[in-house]
Image (cartoon, grey):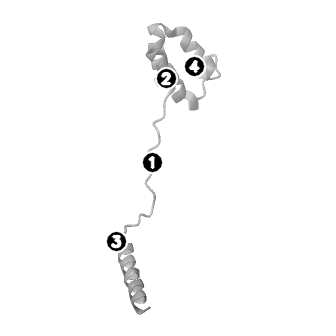
Amino acid sequence: MKNLKQRLMQISEELRQLAEGIEVTAEPAKQEPAPEITLEEVRGVLADISRAGFTADVKKLIVKYGAERLSDVDPNNYSALLNDAKELTNA
């Protein structure tokens, strides 16, 4: 029983020393926000795709995102719209 008590005390001391060696950060690491995509960037990409012969497909994408014109597309959908548009040229 005496050996067990001594071993527990030794483990306790080792854990304390280990805990002292751990650096604690006050704040979690901040993630960089995704860069905001502008209407002008989307317009430029869609114009290039349209000039490559995909005008009707570009129009369908705009409608898919609930708009008649690009300027009416919700900015929250710009990233998804660009992803869909880039798939047109990869097909």
Task: Determine the CA span between mark 4 and mark 1.
Answer: 30 Å
C-beta proximity under 8 Å, tags 2 and 1: no
Observer-nearest residue: 54 or 37? 54
Dot 4 or dot 1, earlier in sequence: 1
Residue 45 sits in quarter: top left
Q: Which residue is mark 4?
A: 70
Task: Determine the CA span between mark 2 and mark 4.
Answer: 9 Å
Task: Determine the CA span between mark 3 and mark 1.
Answer: 26 Å
The residue sitting at the bottom extreme is 2
C-beta proximity under 8 Å, tags 2 and 3: no
The nearer-to-camera label among 3 and 4 is 3
- Residue type, numbered disc 2: Val
C-beta proximity under 8 Å, tags 2 and 4: yes
Q: Secondary structure at mark 2?
A: helix
Identify the residue at horizontal 41%, vertical 66% (top origin): 24
Q: Image height check: is 30 above or below 82? A: below
Q: Which residue is mark 3?
A: 21
Q: Which residue is mark 1?
A: 31
Dot 2 or dot 4, earlier in sequence: 2
- Residue type, numbered disc 1: Gln
Mark 4: few/some/many CA within 10 Å (<14, 14-19, 20+): many
Q: Which residue is mark 2?
A: 42
| Residue 61 image point, x, y percent | 58, 18
Dot 3 or dot 1, earlier in sequence: 3
Mark 2: few/some/many CA within 10 Å (<14, 14-19, 20+): some
Dot 2 or dot 3, earlier in sequence: 3
Task: Determine the CA span between mark 2 and mark 3.
Answer: 50 Å
Observer-nearest residue: 13 or 21? 13
Which quadrant is the N terminus positioned in?
bottom left
